[in-house]
Amino acid sequence: MATLLPAQRGYDNFQFLETKRPWLNLYGIRVRPVAPVGSTSSKPLLESSLLHCSLPDELLQEVFMRLSPYWLGRAACVCRKWRYATRMPSLWRNACLKTWQVSGRQENERLCAEKYGGSWRAMWHDRPRLRFDGLYVSRNTYIRTGIAEWKITNPVHLVCYYRYLRFFPNGKFLYKTTPLRVKEVAKTMQGRAAKLDGLFSGRCMLDGTQVEAAVIYPGSRPTVLRIRLRLRGTIPGAYNRLDLLSLVTCGVDENLVPNETEDVINIVDGWQENETHNPDIPAVSHRRGMQPFVFVPFEEVDTSVLNLPVDKMDYYVPG
């Protein structure tokens, strides 16, 4: 509600409008802990917030232990106390050991001590890593000629399809190619197994910023898909982009097809780009549909711009 104030000091012919802002009275007031019993300090002390009084440090640590690193970053923006609480080394040590569990605990501790000065938080921020809290999405488009009717000029259609990757800490990943949008595919890729509805499971290996991945398409003539990617981030520590360097399909000998306990990435390791082990299925190096992968967290799959149809976004620039 606005009120008119009388003119003052030479502004007799003018009046100005002022809106009441009670929160301005809070400026300059610092929240300080309650003074201990027997304190002789003359400065008035304000009580801490009710949340901090009801939530001891031990319980706050237990809550933060159950948060993902990205939610810890959001919690650090709440207040100064939470900011310092989220920097506990045990929180980031658990996050690092879970993210690079393939390397083993001893190797991670060695790298943390030698390269990152013993700071697990710095290791999490600076060491290249794949993200597991969402999907890497590559949006691709191409033009297809339509059917000519009567004597009208042939129509053309802009076709859109997606490649999806989801990685897991144990070195496995899920791969899917489909015209379905992100919000329609996210639920089916939150499971761990499932060679279901064109969803395939494979193995990957991260070496610095280079990612090597392989998937076997089962069937009467098994085919292996070899993927080579480069990991990067639009901002430091994000690692939200995967540049697709090569995409090769080739035949594999039936005797070399691994079972569930073997690692497909070790079988194709060392193969040349045009190498195949089945003469009926020559190696093919694909050059189309090579748009970079963009990371979309699970909480943003419904609101991502990648869900827009081609009539609203004909081409997407990942950056």
Image (cartoon, rainbow, N blue to C red):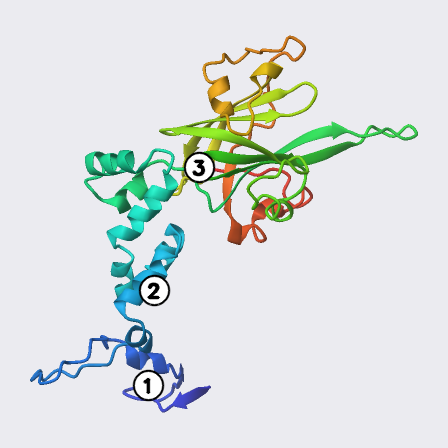
Nearer the observer, disc 1 or disc 2? 2
**Front residue (pair 263, 206):** 263
Please state which of the two labelled residues, at mark 2 or mark 3, is closer to the viewer.
3
Specify the quadrant of the image occupied by residue 21. Answer: bottom left
* Residue 110: percent from left, percent from top: 23, 35
Identify the image quadrant of residue 15.
bottom left
Identity of the residue drawn at 51% across and 24% down? 264
Front tag of 1 and 3: 3
N-terminal of the two: label 2 or label 3?
A: 2
Q: Position of residue 219 (x, y in %)?
A: 68, 23
Q: Which residue is mark 3?
A: 170
**Taking 317 as reference, is 58 above or below it?**
below
Residue 316 place in picture, x, y as percent? 57, 39
Alpha carbon of mark 1 to alpha carbon of mark 3: how far? 74 Å
Q: Which residue type carries mark 1?
A: Tyr
Q: Secondary structure at mark 1?
A: loop
Residue 173 drawn above or below residue 121:
above
At mark 2, the secondary structure is loop
- Residue 166 as seen in the image, left or right of residue 61: right
Of the residues under marks 1 and 2, which one precedes in the sequence?
A: 1
Find disc 1 in the rendering and name its residue: 11
Residue drawn at x 20%, y 42% is: 118
Q: State the residue position of label 2.
A: 78
**Real-space CA distance between mark 2 and mark 3, rounded to the nearest whole angstrom:** 33 Å
Observer-nearest of 147 and 214:
214
